Image: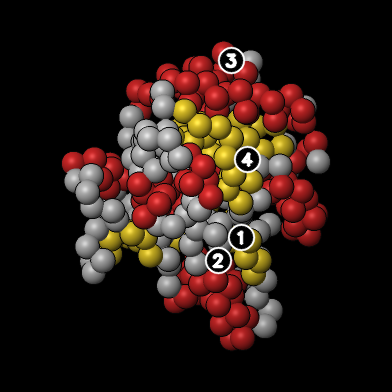
């Protein structure tokens, strides 16, 4: 048996975390650059979104978990001889991975028998959740730790987020989008469909109309699933501030793609991703089922 840990960028619900024994290490958010609030501890998702929507000219920032926080979390389990696997948001979006790796070194220096594996998920939000969910399934199927690790690289390479945002301002302010922003903003009022895979961000299309952008998300996702065997994949949705839009989009995904969403990993996009993408992100996450790898 092994312990699964993740930073809070995975956006798994509290119900899921409790049911599947997932420990979360929180990132933090600041609206003034001085006071930082720990994700879902000092500030709730709804409170963060309300501030972003009511104060659209303020662009919050995130802060990674400290080395000490990660080390203390690891030691809760390594001191009892339990192997740990820890997933972090993509290194391209945060230094959470580096903090976890430094903590791993400290814990192993103190306890050479400690077994700690830190994984840069190369994803965030819904697909970080999907990666963890597949690892949960492997753990619950009694797949040995080493066998799970062997499957992990291919599993992670199969993951995709296809999404759009309400405004590119957040991605631009954070310097997170580069050439995608250049391509998408070459015409006034145009937003992108963004594809995130293997830690890299690419352009899947552009448009002005929100509904057409969501239709483009469906088209891009369908193409990927058709090319790689739809039945081999788990599909989930992530949505931002507008829950009604999120629920409607879930229905559209199931109808248009002829799939049954994995409801446990449909996620209300959390604080960490909202800071990067703004309050109106919406999209689809997919990952291959570990049994089909």
Q: Earlier in the sequence, mark 4 or mark 1?
A: 1
Name the N-terminal-most of marks 2 and 1: 2
Mark 2 touching mark 4, by CB under 8 A? no
Q: Is residue 33 above or below residue 53?
A: below
Q: Residue at x 66, y 50 (%)?
A: 198
Residue where numbered disc 2 is placed: 97
Q: Secondary structure at mark 2?
A: helix
Q: Read off the residue under disc 1.
A: 120
User: Mark 2 touching mark 1, by CB under 8 A?
Assistant: yes
Provide the secondary structure element on which disc 3 rests: helix
Q: Please tell me which residue lies in front, 272 or 82.
A: 272
Mark pair 4, 3: CA separation: 18 Å
Query: What residue is pinned by disc 4?
Result: 160
Whole-percent x, y for residue 14 in the image: 42, 44
Judge depth for marks 4 and 1 and give the one in front: 4
Residue 278 percent location from the top left of the image: 35, 44
Distance in Å between CA atoms under marks 2 and 3: 36 Å
Binning the other alpha carbons within 10 Å of mark 4 as few (below 14), some (14 to 19) or many (20 upward) gives: many
253 sits left or right of 56 in the view: right
Q: Nearer the viewer, residue 171 or 28?
A: 171
Q: Look at the image and tell me in which quarter the N terminus lies.
A: bottom right
């Amino acid at each position: 048996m092994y312990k699964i840990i993740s930073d809070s960028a995975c956006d798994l619900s509290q119900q899921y975390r409790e049911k599947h024994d997932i420990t979360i290490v929180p990132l933090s958010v600041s609206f003034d650059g001085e006071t930082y609030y720990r994700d879902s501890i000092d500030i709730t998702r709804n409170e963060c979104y309300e501030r972003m929507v009511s104060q659209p000219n303020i662009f919050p920032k995130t802060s990674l978990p400290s080395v000490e926080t990660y080390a203390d979390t690891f030691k809760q389990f390594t001191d009892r001889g339990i192997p740990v696997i820890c997933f972090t948001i993509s290194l391209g979006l945060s230094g959470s991975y580096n903090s976890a790796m430094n903590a791993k070194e400290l814990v192993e220096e103190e306890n050479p028998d400690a077994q700690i594996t830190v994984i840069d998920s190369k994803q965030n939000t819904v697909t970080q959740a999907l990666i963890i969910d597949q690892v949960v399934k492997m753990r619950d199927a009694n797949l040995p730790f080493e066998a799970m690790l062997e499957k992990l690289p291919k599993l992670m390479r199969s993951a995709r987020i296809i999404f759009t945002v309400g405004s590119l301002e957040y991605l631009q302010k954070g310097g997170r989008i580069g050439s995608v922003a250049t391509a998408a903003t070459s015409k006034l009022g145009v937003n992108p469909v963004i594809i995130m895979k293997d830690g890299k961000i690419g352009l899947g299309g552009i448009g002005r109309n929100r509904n057409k952008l969501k239709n483009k998300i469906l088209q891009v996702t369908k193409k990927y699933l058709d090319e790689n065997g739809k039945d081999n994949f788990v599909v989930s949705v992530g949505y931002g501030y507008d829950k009604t839009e999120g629920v409607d989009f879930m229905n559209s995904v199931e109808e248009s793609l002829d799939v049954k969403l994995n409801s446990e990993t449909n996620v209300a996009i959390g604080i960490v991703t909202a800071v990067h993408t703004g309050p109106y992100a919406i999209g689809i996450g997919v990952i291959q089922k570990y049994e089909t790898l």
